[in-house]
Amino acid sequence: MESFIVSARKYRPITFKSVVGQDHITTTLKNAIKNNQLAQAFLFCGPRGVGKTTCARILAKTINCTNPTADMEACNECDSCRSFNNSSSFNVFELDAASNNSVDDIRELVKQVYIPPQYSRYKIYIIDEVHMLSAAAFNAFLKTLEEPPSYAKFILATTEKHKILPTILSRCQIFDFKRIKSEDIANHLQFVATHEGIKFEPEALHVIAQKAEGGLRDALSMFDQLVNFCDGNLTYQSCIDNLNVLDSDYFFRFVDYFRSGDIANSLLLYQQVIDKGFDGQHFITGLSEHLRNLMVALDPATTSLLEVSDNVRAKFVQQSQQCRLPLILKYLEMASDAEYRYRDASNKRLFIEVALMKMAKLLNANAQLPTQAAPAQPAPNAPATAQQPQTQPQQVQHVQPQPVQQPQQQTTQPQPAQQPQQKVSPPQPQPIQQPLQQTPHQQPQPAPVVKPVQVKIPTNTSSFISINTQNQTQPASNPVEEKKNEPITLTPEELQKQWNQLAEIKKLTNMEVFTLMNDKELNLIDKNNFEVIVTNSIFEQRFKQYKVEIVEALRFRTNIPKLNFTVKVVPLYDESEEKLYTTKDKFTAMAKENPALVQFRQSLFQDIEY
């Protein structure tokens, strides 16, 4: 039974021409070989699976080839090429820095460098994952890397260039490998599938290429897995089922539902996405990418940026023609915001559903904007020379449309919505068609009607009548004004009562004022003035800060407009008295009151420890 070789090894490039998606690297290397301008050290850096080690092997094989082609490719026929292909070359050494990263390993390598090559021009060292070397190993490698023998070449490969010492970087020619385009990966997969005799759908290869995210080795590994899953018939549906990829048709349907404002179907479709095992983060990321592709497909010049198959590209172009750029940008903004805030949401499903509902109602909300501004436009039956007060009949028409359609029939029996206008101009039986310029001659007080009418007015007729009625009639008796007409008689008890009640109110609104007013002694001077007794100057300063607020509140509560207070500081003790701090001071004060204490101390032959 023949052993199976994975596609990543079986179809590994062996020439510069067969390298996928790294033309800027291969062209530079071939020109360096052609002009005999090879550096002593190369550093190949880039993400995984883009061809770093492959290009290092091709370079090592080509520079030792004794009969290269005109295009600077290895001939694969000389002894050096055959020994390299059979992995038996004595002049090409591959090391894994992840397992040989100590100083001793580098010292052993340096000793081998000074042994000349056998039957070849160069002695080449390929060190993979060179960023795994320790700092001491890098330092031991510096001198040899900078000034190696003329026949020694070093090719270093790494996925994390930022971990390499700057002293190493300065001694190498750095080649940055880029991620391979999805189109290039799909073409290479098509070549492999054709060579292996595997049936495939182009959309399936594009799904694999997008899932690989620029890594050709990952794409080939997924390709082998899917070939076994599909039993040699690679279909689009089998790829998305096996790779856990959400079908792009779902996103096309979501956008169609957004455009039609269909919230119900949007939620039901999202339920189908959840039933297939996709989480919200995966879905919202895919939706954002879909909206980005829609925006790109709007302009034919940017259609080439879509990394999809031709059939899917045509769908994007067709759907983008049904949408406008501002609408797509708004969708994309909402989806990106939901993707950013998804991790912080406690109810993640509800969070996504709310975002979908907002997108579905976005187009309808924008479509209603002209209808909301319609009442500000002149009515069809209004005179062309009407001035700004013409907004009054427009509002009446918006509240009650019947008078506009049948103005002649409503003259004898006006509806409640027209009563305010009949009060303004009673001689005119048709308030809607009457030119408002004649109103000042017939009615000397037009302001009460014109003033309350505004552009934004409730559509409820009862609300309209109540607004005009409130403006035309006198308001009811104000309990505040009635209270102000009855000032209270200020007594010490009433003053303390109002003060305590105000303090309780401030407890709910301003705790600092409550603390200041609580448990304070008041001294009534006359009917308009009183004193607040405090114990220190700090309270006095704080009362000065809040005095205006407290006085205004007390004046309102007592209905005494001239009520005012002053702050009086009454210390708890007499500051002029001498304070006893030390033991000596205390004994001296006690001895003044009782001189026998001095004799008692002397009789005991004791002294005070001060």
Image (cartoon, rainbow, N blue to C red):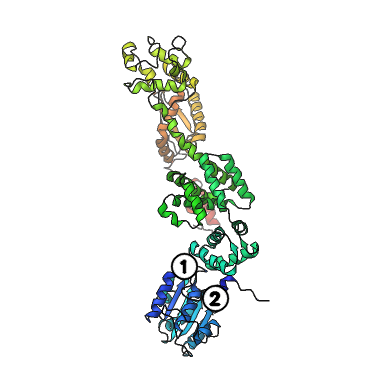
- Front one among 385 and 522: 385
Observer-nearest of 66 and 525: 66
Callout 2 environment at 10 Å: few (<14), some (14 to 19), or many (20+)?
Answer: some
Coordinates of residue 369 in the picture (x, y in percent): 44, 34
Q: Secondary structure at mark 1?
A: loop
Residue 591 % position (x, y): 49, 49
Q: Which residue is mark 2?
A: 98
Whole-percent x and y of residue 264? 59, 40
**Relative to residue 222, is residue 468 drawn left or right?**
left
The reply to whether residue 519 is in sight is no
Sequence-wise, which precedes: disc 2 or disc 1?
1
Q: Amino acid at mark 1?
A: Gly
Of the residues tagged 2 and 1, which is closer to the observer? 1
Q: Which residue is mark 1?
A: 21
Tell me where residue 576 sits by quadrant: top left
At x 50%, y 20%, the residue is 462
Tell me if I can see residue 544 in this picture: yes
Q: Which residue lies at the image location 45% right of the left edge and 50% below the top edge?
A: 295
User: Which quadrant of the structure image shows residue 385?
Assistant: top left
Disc on res. 274: none
Vertical placement of 23 versus 503: above or below? Answer: below
Residue type at mark 2? Ala
| The N terminus, quarter of image | bottom right
